[in-house]
Image (cartoon, rainbow, N blue to C red):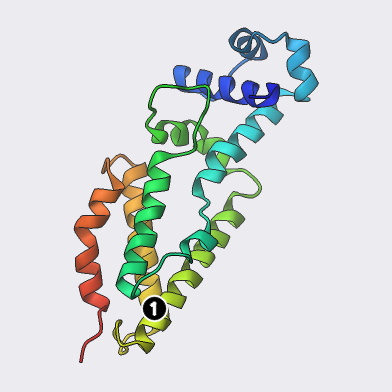
Amino acid sequence: MNTRQLILEKTLKLMIEKQNSIISIREISAATGIATGGIYHHFSNKEEIYNEITERYYLNFYKFNIDELRQIKGNAKEKIHDAMAEIFKQQQMGIKIESIDDEIDYRIILAILTAKGFVHENFQELCQSLLNELKDFFTEIVEEGQKNRQIRQDYSTEDIADSLINMYMGIAYKWESYIIDDMISVFEDNFDLQWEKIRFRE
């Protein structure tokens, strides 16, 4: 691990331990074993450290690789199921932090970074872009499913895609809010009901 990454991860670890996003350079120095001058060699100020932590461990948490999801094979039901299951699996695992061996509930990190993440200049744009990408992805599957008589044709493609987005957002919100502890099991419990609403009918 390079020095810059070490500083970021040790600072995040301090935030987790203190349940607070306000950490002093002196505390970072003690945690990393790097003199304050060495820290300032890699970061111009504490705010730069905070910003990079927010981008790496908050903003990146919400990203998913649409190109990888497009590699999923199967019929419409299988593609929708497997893509959503993969998204929930990745988000529940969170972003790997090399210097922390203990398993961490990633919601703790999200809670600590939410204040900084929500006001980050790229956050709103990122969220809208990701939702648009996900909607386009589901729209492609729905269109193909309607064409192949796997998804009902009396509902518009957009309405069905929106219903899938709403399912995703609802489960993710409940998990982040500690209403549920396992996104994947809740998704599995509800998927067949969701599919029944959109499956093709003769």
Tell how many labels: 1
- The spot of residue 58 in percent (x, y) is 53, 40
Q: Which residue is mark 1?
A: 142
Can residue 72 be seen by looking at this rendering? yes
Q: Inspect the image, locate mark 1, and give the three-letter code of the amino acid beneath it.
A: Val
- Residue visible at 40% across and 40% down? 93
The answer to whether residue 102 is left or right of residue 193 is: right
- Residue visible at 23% across and 75% down? 197
- Residue visible at 24% across and 63% down? 191
- The spot of residue 181 in percent (x, y) is 27, 40
Q: Is residue 12 above or below residue 36?
A: below
Can residue 22 be seen by looking at this rendering? no
Seen as rendered, the residue at the extreme bottom is: 202
Viewer-closest of 2 and 104? 2
For the C terminus, the image quarter is bottom left
For the N terminus, the image quarter is top right
- The spot of residue 66 in percent (x, y) is 52, 61
- Residue visible at 65% across and 34% down? 52
- The spot of residue 65 in percent (x, y) is 53, 56
> Secondary structure beneath disc 1?
helix
Q: Is residue 82 above or below residue 44?
A: below
The answer to whether residue 78 is left or right of residue 134 is: left
Q: Residues within 10 Å of mark 1 (few under 14, many from 20)?
A: many
Viewer-closest of 20 and 198? 198
